[in-house]
Amino acid sequence: MKKNGSFFLSIVDRASLKPAIWDPYSYREKKQTQILGYFASVQALKAAALPPHAFNFAPLEYRHIGRGHVPVFILESSGSGLQSSCHGVGEGALLFGTMRAYLGNVVVTPRAEWIGEQSPFVFAIKSEFVQVVPKDGLVYFWWAYLQTQSFLHSLPIGTGGTRPRLHASSLSQTPIEVPTKDIRERLHAQIEAFAASLWSQYMKTQRLLENTIGL
């Protein structure tokens, strides 16, 4: 762009770019309003042959996810290594529950090192989820945002029994209003640090109970 007889070059993060007439005061805007699909891809989980270690824990179901904004979930022992038809996802996968009664059930799978496993690690998934893959990579910011009431109230779920589940294409079209990238990065880093600590404490507690009273 030419201004006052000289050229200048601007490098902009794609997630921050909004098609429009140039506005020199646009930087003052604190939030970005778009649809989820502009910031993340939403993918159905694919069936695949899972490695044996994926069944070190029972496949993830909605019942393993607690209420509240806590970035951990129950890792249930698989006992005898039960294997069934399941999907699988890797570490750091952001999953969103699609059944109407469980909308807002959102998890990020932990890093292998946080739970005493070797990387790469695959988690077996049983309940109905889609995977949300943020373009900015800030899964823990999006984990928190996808649980906000403003987002959940914007979901296109219809009324009555007409739409028992939310499809990936509909989720990606949900309108959102998010902070700028620097704020998202800060929140992601803080929540990720909390998650690492909580997963470590959770696994220590589980091992203590298993070794002492057989839980």
Image: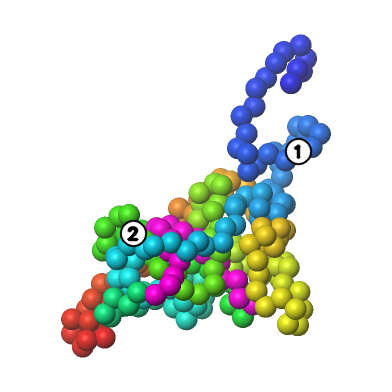
Give residue 149's quadrant in the image.
Answer: bottom right
Q: Residues within 10 Å of mark 2 (few under 14, many from 20)?
A: some
Which of the image's four quarters has the N terminus?
top right
**Res. 9 mark:** none
Whole-percent x, y for residue 179 in the image: 63, 52
Q: Looking at the image, which residue sits at the far bottom?
A: 213
User: With 155 as the anchor, is 78 left or right in this view?
Assistant: left
How far is disc 1 from disc 2 in space, using C-alphas?
Answer: 40 Å
Q: Which residue is at a point 56% across and 47% down the rendered structure image?
A: 135
The type of residue carrying mark 1 is: Pro
Q: Residues within 10 Å of mark 1 (few under 14, many from 20)?
A: few
Question: Circle 2 — which element?
Answer: loop
Whole-percent x, y for residue 182 in the image: 56, 45
Q: Looking at the image, which residue sits at the far top?
A: 5
Q: Which residue is at a point 78% across and 14% down the rendered structure image?
A: 4
43, above or below 158, in the image: above
Pointer 1 residue: 19
- Residue 99 inside the magenta-drawn segment: yes
Q: Which residue is at a point 30% across and 55% down the rendered structure image?
A: 119
**Res. 121 mark:** 2
Whole-percent x, y for residue 208 in the image: 22, 78
Residue range corresponding to the magenta coloring: 84-100
Asked whether the beta carbons under mark 1 and mark 2 sit within 8 Å of each other, the answer is no
Which badge, 1 or 2, comes first in the chain's sequence?
A: 1
